[in-house]
Amino acid sequence: MSTPSGYRIAVVGCGVGGMAVATLLADAGHAVTVYERFAVPRPLGAGLLLQPTGLSVLRRLGVEPVALDCGARITGIDGRTTRGRTVLRLNYADLDPRLHGLGIHRGALFDLLFERLKRSAATLKTASEVARIDASETQAVLHFANGTAPVAVDLALVADGAHSALRMQAGIRHRAPLYPWGCLWTTLPDVEGRFAGQLHQRFRDSRVMIGALPVGRRPDDPQGPPCITVFWSLPAREIEAARAAGVAALKARFLEHWPELAAPLEHLREVDQIAGATYRHVAMPRWSAGRVAFLGDAAHGTSPQLGQGANLALLDAATLASALATAPDIDTALSLAEAERQPPAAFYRQASHLLTPFYQSRFAPLGWLRDLTFGPLCAFPPSRNLMLSTLAGVRRSWWRTFPLDAAGRPDLPLVNSASAACI
């Protein structure tokens, strides 16, 4: 049963998508409670690249200026082989001069979304791991791992990431295999600003990929120097062994392939500065069953190759909030939101899955093929536009894009609709 001011909604997970959807729904008058399994909510992962699509949701939340202030403006991608041959050269301005990305430390993004959540009417319950959700056509009942009494709500939204344990018992057919490759990452000062302005990548066939993404200032050092997140792609089963080898060994591996990283790597002194990450390829033909629905990486996780995870989660959140504001009931809202979001999510899931072996695999000839063909593809207008619109997050499908409005911003149905503006 809904409250006089809206629906009773539970959000599982206090990550990017969970905080965004909880804030938007609470602002719309729904009774929202966020359940987080950790005692203290915290960000997990490396720096990330927000695209114009993701920035449009931050604008709707009223936090875009803060994000722009603490992040780093990204104008494009510069990808080369370790011998210096250009493989990828993409600039947002070639799609539209007003477009750009934003590199941001995940902790900084978490902080600004968390502060925005706290300013909303949503309730946050920590140390509350949801072990099971029993969903019917009229309600969802949450059961907790700590034995807390079950809670019944009108709608449960699961936003607990690609490794979600709740997918299996939701009764929705899905696949979520673990990618064989993951990465090591660390965030380091770029005092001289050598890597400013672009996402830089270095490749050696398909077995070595190193990246340096400007992410602005660290949230724990807001007056400090600009930083970059450095990441190294490697098989998931080798992550712990690589960390165990120690800082000196890791530095040597980085510098063997990319000597220009020497200055930032001077600030890498302890293994604790290095974290590992693994990924899943999540495919769900539908995202809801009864009164439980999945969003973000829990519904369509991918490899990080296209860097769209946070953007897709933010768009899911904004679209669902708008659908609930305009639809006459929850079932119609879920259908409306899923119909809008499934095609773009499917495109990015499929494109990422297809591209990943060219960058992360044991089959070196795929890297050689990439080095031969991707440069010309970046220069040929039709393929360049496909690559740029994919980078900017504005692909609606393999054949369609979201148009840009008069201000040069992605014109996203529901996200930028009149109904969204009044929420």
Image (cartoon, helix red, strand yellow):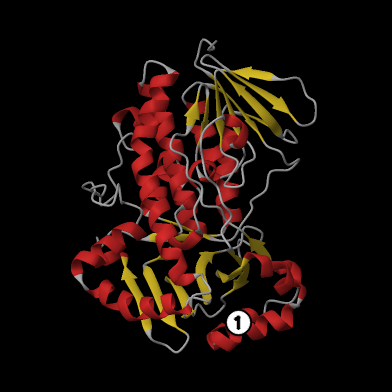
Left or right for 269, reference 81: right
State the residue in front, 188 or 69.
Answer: 188
Q: How many marks?
A: 1
Residue 101 image point, x, y percent: 40, 60
Left or right for 371, reference 188: left
Q: Which residue is mark 1?
A: 254
Residue 4 image point, x, y percent: 51, 10
Q: Counting other residues with Cα less than 10 Å from the Cα at mark 1, is it few (<14), some (14-19), or many (20 or more)?
A: some
Q: Quadrant of the C terminus?
A: top left
Residue 360 image point, x, y percent: 51, 70
Left or right for 415, reference 93: right
Residue 257 position by quadrant: bottom right
State the residue in front, 232 or 98.
Answer: 232
- Report whether residue 334 is seen: yes
What residue is rendered at 75% in x and 36% in y? 127
What residue is rendered at 38% in x and 57% in y? 351
Residue 284 image point, x, y percent: 47, 40
Query: Which amino acid lies under the numbered mark 1 shown in the image of this protein?
Result: Phe
Secondary structure under the numbered disc 1 in the rendered image: helix
State the residue in front, 155 or 357.
Answer: 357
Vertical placement of residue 5 versus 128, above or below:
above
